[in-house]
Amino acid sequence: MNSVVTEKNIFSRSYVEKIRTSIAPIIENMIKPNAKMIDKEGKFPRENLVALAKEGWNSVTLPEKWGGLDLGYLGFSIAAEEIGKVDASTALVYAMHIGATQVVNLYGNDDQKERWLLPIREGSIGTFSISEKATRGHVWFNLSQAERAEQDYIINAEKSFTTSGGQADFYILQTRTPETTDPSRVSYFIVDGHSKGISVKPWKALGVRGNHSGPISYRNVKVERRDLIGNEKLGNEIMDEGINPIYLVGLASAWLGVAQGALNAAVEHVTKAVNKGFNKNLADYQVIRQKLAEVKMQISALKAWQLDLARHHDELLAEGKSLSELAIEVIEFKVQTSELADFAARIAMDVAGGYGYQEGIFERLYRDARAGIPMAPSNNIARDQVGKDLVGLPLELWNEGNNGS
């Protein structure tokens, strides 16, 4: 890819803008032109991802040794935001992919990194496969359980809402550790996406139609011992250290991008649309300007939070510290950005009037933006988690009735 920067001053606005400028050609020349087709056909955005991969963006957080750009969470959050401005489907696939690579990067061994991270530059895609229909929005709580096959493992599981389902080259799969009766004892495996026994159901949804986040079944899928991440039951450490911070700042940044994309589309429309009866642009009306200004101010506020969170992620990792202290804050950030995306899309449709309601950019943005609210952690569950933390109550993650719907 083009050289992003020669000097990494993470607190410099010019550094942040250079990252935006570096990814801009792919956004404008590939991802933006494909957005309408991806939505209409429900097509997985593989062409977009391959283009991003070859320029290093799919390895944005990884060190150079593993083919990465070494731009950390700051680079991740900016890239996800920029992609989200033009196509929510690609942004969600991207965020989950980077999260999956980070699990391998932070917890995998060199053999795993060589086999699973190096191919990313050629277009290999990873994702998470965690949630289960049986436990619904409580994605940390699995009823599936790995079985032993001598030194290896057999996976039988029904996973729901696996982004890039049927498309990913590898899945970071979470399940109970073999033989344990303790539901909190989980393990993580890297599952080859091309393994026999993996099947998916079609993804048909209101919005984000290209992210293929449908149900996926694992039937007697064999996973070699070498693709256990760390040791058995290490999943508890990954959860304790914060599985959410591993990917959620990028996912939330994607929704911030969707909000900005909605605002951009609305501004373009109202400055060009003319009411010939009064010889005025729609932008000449105060009520419309005020609606757009409210969206703009909320985006500006969250962008400051976004950059601070991303920098904090990078600082903690550089110091060898756990990301767990960010777990609640990134959940708060996800709630705010997903609800802002929904608000911005509604305002954009509102100011566009009847034009916004017909099939097109505003209608697509409105459908896409709705996806962020139920996406795990759903905003209802997230608020309860934040509230419990606030008043000092335990999260009780392994109690089946713990957090509402």
Image (cartoon, rainbow, N blue to C red):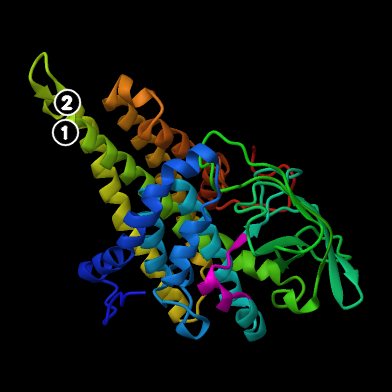
Left or right: residue 392 versus residue 260 is right
Residue, far top: 277
Neighbor class of circle 2 (other Cα within 10 Å; few <14, some 14-19, many 20+) is many
Region of the chain picked out in magenta, as a range: 116-127
Give yes or no for contact between labels 2 and 1 (Cβ–Cβ under 8 Å): yes
Neighbor class of circle 1 (other Cα within 10 Å; few <14, some 14-19, many 20+) is few
Tell me what residue is drawn at x 64 percent, y 79 percent.
Answer: 115
Q: Quadrant of the N terminus?
A: bottom left
Tell me what residue is drawn at x 68 percent, y 44 percent.
Answer: 402
Q: Position of residue 141 (x, y in %)?
A: 72, 53
Q: Quick check: is 117 in the magenta stretch?
A: yes
Q: Secondary structure at mark 2?
A: helix
Q: Position of residue 33 (x, y in %)?
A: 37, 48
> The residue under label 2 is which amino acid type?
Leu
> The residue under label 1 is which amino acid type?
Thr
Residue under circle 1? Answer: 271
Q: Real-space Cα distance between discs 2 and 1?
A: 6 Å
Left or right: residue 321 versus residue 268 is right
